[in-house]
Image (tube, rainbow, N blue to C red):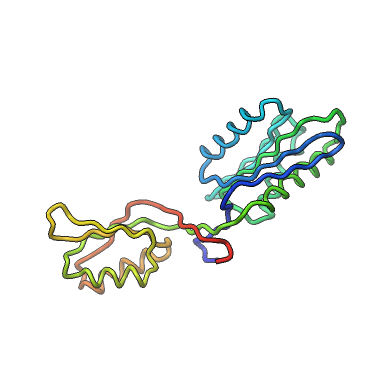
Amino acid sequence: MSPDDFLTLAASAEAQTRVKASVFLASAHPAGSEEEARAILAARERAMWDATHHCSAWKLRGGISRANDAGEPNGSAGAPILAAIEGAGLTDVIVIVTRWYGGTRLGVGGLVRAYGEAAALAIEAAPRRVGTLAVRLRVRYPYAHTAAVMRVLERAGAAEVEHGYAESGDAGIAEFSVPTQAAAFVRDELREATAGALAPEPIGPRVLYRNADA
């Protein structure tokens, strides 16, 4: 993978384990922000309101990570869940392990093993995909430069390409996404192909996805 790539989940998955009558139901989900992760956790808590604990951890782009023991002894639940995420090399992921207490105390060591195992099983069951950090660009060009612009987009491997026209009708507009590292290539190639007449306008960040085995 390139420096712009990261491994994440393509879809959610669940796994369940039992330890001394306690049930541990783990769910792993893709999540692109803390807001999304918190919303997934809140929905889980509402749906399974009768559970004893909803312990969780997430890891996001930019080095953001959280681990929540949710009432279990300090470090016995959130930390092993986060360790399972990091051990799988995943980013932009939240894992929630919901526990129904079975009447027998497991001790800190037992909880660490139970929460870590349940989290790892849910992660293993989930399909993967690769995310690529990208940027969305726009270029407005006179029709005389259409062929040059299309060649640059093809060479850059542009994705999510959308074509439009200026209101005046005298120019074309292309919006497209390229990996962050390719943005400078697009800028330089457009300038060279059009004798400095064109330069891309940044719109904002994007993430492009592909299957993990692609």
Is residue 115 rendered to the left or right of residue 190?
right
Nearer to me, 181 or 163? 163
- The residue under the point 13% across, 57% down is 169
- The residue under the point 66% across, 42% down is 27
Is residue 102 rendered to the left or right of residue 52?
right
> Is 51 drawn above or below residue 153 in the view shown?
above
- The residue under the point 62% across, 30% down is 47
Q: Count all numbered tags in the image, as a single digit.
A: 0
Residue 101 is situated, as x and y percent measured from the top left of the image, at: 80, 30
Nearer to me, 183 or 104? 104
Residue 92 is situated, as x and y percent measured from the top left of the image, at: 56, 49
Residue 28 is situated, as x and y percent measured from the top left of the image, at: 64, 45
> Is 84 drawn above or below residue 74 in the view shown?
below
Query: Splitting the image into 4 quarters, where does residue 72 fall?
Result: top right
Is residue 102 rendered to the left or right of residue 55?
right
Residue 23 is situated, as x and y percent measured from the top left of the image, at: 78, 36
For the C terminus, the image quarter is bottom right
